[in-house]
């Protein structure tokens, strides 16, 4: 009979049910599953601090006699020494788990797998493995002992050997479904569970069974969906930290830990990383309702976040694969996660390159001012090549053009008005009948809409019709709970029925992906640029353009950036100066600073065109800074962009060996721009490339040869890029301005970059700027920012 008593860390008057399960402290249950025993000892003296009450089942020593005793008195001298050696060795404890021991139980040898980890006292989320530094929080060494019945299938160091064939199959897989199917079949063969499923979560953490390997007599679950409430948030958080969990017998009686609170802290022992951790009574009841007798789950992660699970179920009785078998299954799941991340990254790069190529063509089309802007976006390629939809409507400069299924102009205008009222750059919904019923949209044409609102009632609108579909759920998702009468009390329990339940989904279109929203946002910027180039009456819109183009830069882990743009003293608040920062697919960071010859809106329009073209060219990491400028120069000529500009393109890159040495490289090419400046953490600032001449400005001679320069930059240094408005005055020449800049920045190598750029503007521009100023400062951290442990 399952013990459904809640954790001792809940209020004893509060039953555990679905009304409070999201608050249940499942990482500190105060008990373990009794397939093994748990001992927590102090370090380095290895004195027993806490034990599970079933200690005698494995060691022959009663738990009351073990507390406060050396570990050797409980396990024996030789096993205790083996544990001490493993715990004291450098590196991750997981690499040495399990420690294979043989204990003496009433005169009989008992082979045991000892699984070690450390639990921090205080906050949850302890690291696994490396002994803590002297100033680290106190911790306990947690030793979990699982009897090893029968021959061990393979030792942990040979895990790869056990799954090598499957990994080769994963590497040969040509699509996602093949990856899924190969993994579940291998995990079932390896572990012996009756059913192995692969769940994939959507954005709301509803799960879908996308692959299954099961015994022939079982009803298939493939294609079933399960609501997010089946796995509450704190359970998902544990899955992201501890990647495998086994419940060998769902009818187990929990073995309590003694003492209940750790003697040094009065707090519960954190069992986040415990392999024997007792699970929520509610989850046990959930499994009982499904008819499951044993369960195992393995986390699938992407970017350290849970995207899916491998769920294993056994129905005929308890089932306990040995630790090494579980480790092999976990290794397979980790390999699948890596392959999925690689495949997703490849797809994202290809998709991003296609989108940027389409955007570049569309941008070029808008440069033909003899053609209405609305029509130029519906040529070849057109906006439906950028974002897939049933209809696209473009309303710009008083003209309207439509591609795809015809949409009534009044309906399109009403949807655009709804989008403008959202006060966002891009508005979208896949359920307009629900979120905006007043529009009374024709569902077969515009159940969903993605809209780019533009000034003066202009817009671009993509529409998708209703996408009728049927979702198969594992039980009615609306019946998340049932009520049970227990004596005079009524308890809320998980649902009992998991029969296939079909839901017809209506009044929704295919959802808009984050990538499609991003592409529409990029189009908005390009359209604003084109509108500015075609109109002289854009003072208010010019300020919108400035904010849209000169946005905050990314902040990679190893860099800190600050940017500023100061327009000259004139009415229009934009000009030809710009900065840009973005990350390439290989992880390098591209820095751009430029200055279009000319001023005001015309220069800003040209600047926007150059910025968009440069971004599209430079996204490909195989094209270096010199290649970027050469291609941009040829594009200026080929597209007949009336532009002449100074531009500096730099790439911050770093090899593993350079990371170890604490240095990075800056690789740059200079088309007539001012030289970059490097300020060490201590010492004087230096100008880079002063021993070489900069190449010609863009727009002068597209056939000119562009050169690249490379310099090594130490961690802690600051790279400064700037336009001539910072150093040029009517009463001083460039050389004087540069010398003053070097003087003003001296001694500020450790000043935070946000303060540094403001300090330079204050000292270099005490009055209003005579010319536009763009400023970009990049600090290379002395060491990578720490990432949270998984």
Image (cartoon, rainbow, N blue to C red):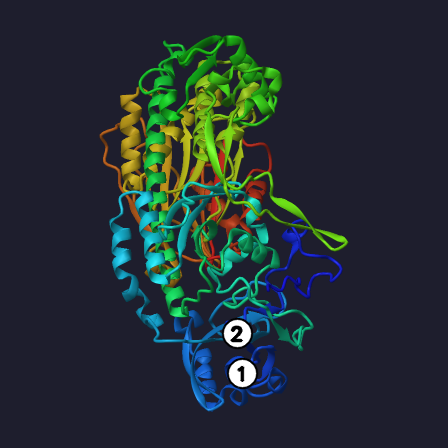
* Residue located at (51% from left, 84% from top): 59
Decide if residue 400 is on the left or right side of residue 629. right
- Residue 226 shows in the view: yes
Q: Check residue 289 in the rendering and tell me which mark sits there, or answer none.
A: none
Of 206 and 763, the residue lying toward us: 206
Mark 2 Cα shell of 10 Å, populated few (<14), some (14-19), many (≥20)? few
* Image coords of residue 328 (percent x, y): 36, 64
Q: Check residue 133 in the rendering and tell me which mark sits there, or answer none.
A: 2
Q: Which residue is mark 1?
A: 44
Mark 1 Cα shell of 10 Å, populated few (<14), some (14-19), many (≥20)? few
Between marks 2 and 1, how big is the CA–CA gap? 13 Å
Quadrant of the rendered image containing residue 401: top left
- Residue 691 shows in the view: no
Dot 2 or dot 1, earlier in sequence: 1
Give the structural element (helix, strand or loop) at label 2: loop
* Image coords of residue 583 (percent x, y): 40, 43
* Residue located at (47% from left, 72% from top): 130
């Amino acid at each position: 009979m399952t013990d459904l008593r809640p954790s001792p860390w809940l209020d004893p008057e509060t039953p555990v049910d679905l009304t409070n399960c999201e608050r249940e402290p499942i990482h500190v249950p105060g008990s373990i599953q009794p397939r093994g025993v748990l001992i927590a000892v102090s370090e380095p003296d290895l004195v027993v601090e806490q034990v599970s009450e079933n200690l005698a089942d494995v060691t022959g020593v009663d738990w009351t006699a073990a507390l406060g005793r050396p570990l050797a008195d409980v396990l024996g001298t030789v096993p205790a020494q083996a544990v001490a050696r493993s715990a004291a060795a450098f590196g991750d404890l997981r690499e040495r788990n399990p420690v294979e021991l043989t204990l003496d139980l009433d005169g009989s040898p008992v082979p045991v797998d000892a699984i070690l980890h450390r639990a921090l006292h205080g906050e949850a989320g302890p690291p696994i493995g490396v002994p803590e530094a002297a100033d680290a929080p106190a911790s306990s060494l947690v030793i979990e002992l699982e009897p090893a019945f029968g021959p061990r299938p393979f030792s942990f160091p040979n895990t790869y050997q056990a799954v090598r064939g499957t990994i080769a199959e994963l590497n040969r897989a040509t699509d996602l479904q093949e990856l899924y199917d190969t993994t579940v079949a291998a995990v079932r063969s390896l572990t012996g569970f009756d059913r192995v499923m692969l769940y994939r979560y959507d954005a709301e953490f509803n799960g879908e069974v996308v692959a299954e390997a099961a015994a022939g007599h079982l009803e298939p679950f493939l294609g079933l969906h399960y609501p997010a409430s089946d796995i509450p948030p704190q359970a998902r958080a544990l899955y992201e930290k501890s990647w495998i969990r086994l419940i060998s017998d769902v009818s187990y009686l929990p073995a309590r830990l003694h003492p209940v609170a750790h003697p040094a802290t009065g707090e519960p022992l954190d069992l986040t990383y415990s392999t024997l951790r007792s699970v929520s009574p509610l989850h046990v009841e959930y499994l009982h309702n499904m008819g499951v007798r044993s369960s195992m789950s393995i986390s699938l992660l992407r970017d350290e976040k849970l995207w899916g699970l491998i769920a294993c179920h056994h129905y005929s009785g308890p089932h306990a694969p040995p630790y090494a078998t579980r480790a092999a299954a976990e290794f397979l799941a980790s390999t699948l996660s890596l392959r999925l991340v690689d495949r997703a990254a490849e797809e994202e790069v290809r998709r991003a390159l296609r989108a940027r190529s389409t955007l570049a063509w569309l941008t070029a089309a808008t440069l033909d001012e003899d053609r209405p802007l609305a029509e130029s976006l519906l040529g070849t390629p057109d906006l439906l090549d950028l974002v897939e939809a049933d209809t696209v409507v473009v309303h710009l400069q008083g003209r309207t053009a439509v591609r795809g299924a015809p949409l009534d102009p009044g309906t399109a205008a009403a949807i655009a008005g709804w989008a403008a009222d959202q006060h966002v750059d891009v508005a979208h919904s896949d359920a307009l009948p629900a979120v905006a019923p007043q529009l009374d949209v024709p569902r077969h044409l515009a159940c969903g809409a993605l809209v780019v609102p533009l000034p003066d009632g202009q817009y671009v609108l993509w529409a998708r019709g209703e996408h009728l579909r049927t979702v198969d759920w594992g039980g009615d998702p609306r019946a998340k709970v049932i009520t049970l009468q227990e004596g005079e009390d009524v308890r809320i329990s998980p649902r009992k029925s998991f029969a296939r339940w079909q839901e017809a989904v209506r009044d929704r279109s295919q959802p808009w992906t984050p990538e499609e929203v991003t592409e529409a946002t990029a189009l908005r910027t390009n359209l604003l640029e084109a509108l500015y180039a075609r109109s002289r009456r854009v003072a208010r819109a010019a300020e919108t353009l400035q904010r849209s183009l000169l946005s905050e830069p990314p902040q990679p882990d190893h860099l800190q950036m600050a940017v500023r743009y100061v327009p000259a003293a004139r009415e229009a608040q934009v000009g030809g100066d710009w900065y840009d920062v973005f990350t390439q697919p290989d992880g390098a960071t591209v820095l751009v600073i430029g200055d279009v010859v000319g001023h005001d809106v015309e220069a800003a329009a040209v600047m926007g065109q150059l910025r968009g073209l440069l971004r599209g060219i430079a996204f490909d990491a195989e094209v270096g800074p010199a290649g970027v400028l050469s291609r941009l120069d040829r594009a200026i000529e080929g597209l007949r962009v009336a532009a002449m500009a100074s531009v500096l393109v730099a790439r911050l890159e770093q090899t593993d060996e350079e990371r170890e040495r604490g240095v990075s490289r800056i690789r740059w090419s200079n088309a007539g721009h001012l030289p970059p400046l490097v300020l060490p953490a201590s010492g004087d600032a230096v100008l880079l490339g002063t021993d070489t001449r900069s190449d010609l400005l863009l727009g002068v001679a597209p056939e000119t040869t562009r050169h690249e320069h490379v310099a090594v930059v130490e961690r802690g240094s600051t790279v400064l890029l700037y336009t001539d408005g910072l150093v040029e005055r009517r009463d001083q020449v460039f050389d004087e301005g540069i010398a003053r800049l070097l003087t003003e920045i001296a001694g500020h190598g450790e000043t935070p970059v946000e303060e540094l750029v403001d300090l330079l503007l204050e000292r270099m521009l005490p009055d209003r700027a005579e010319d536009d100023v763009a400023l970009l400062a990049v600090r290379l951290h002395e060491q990578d920012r720490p990432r949270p442990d998984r």
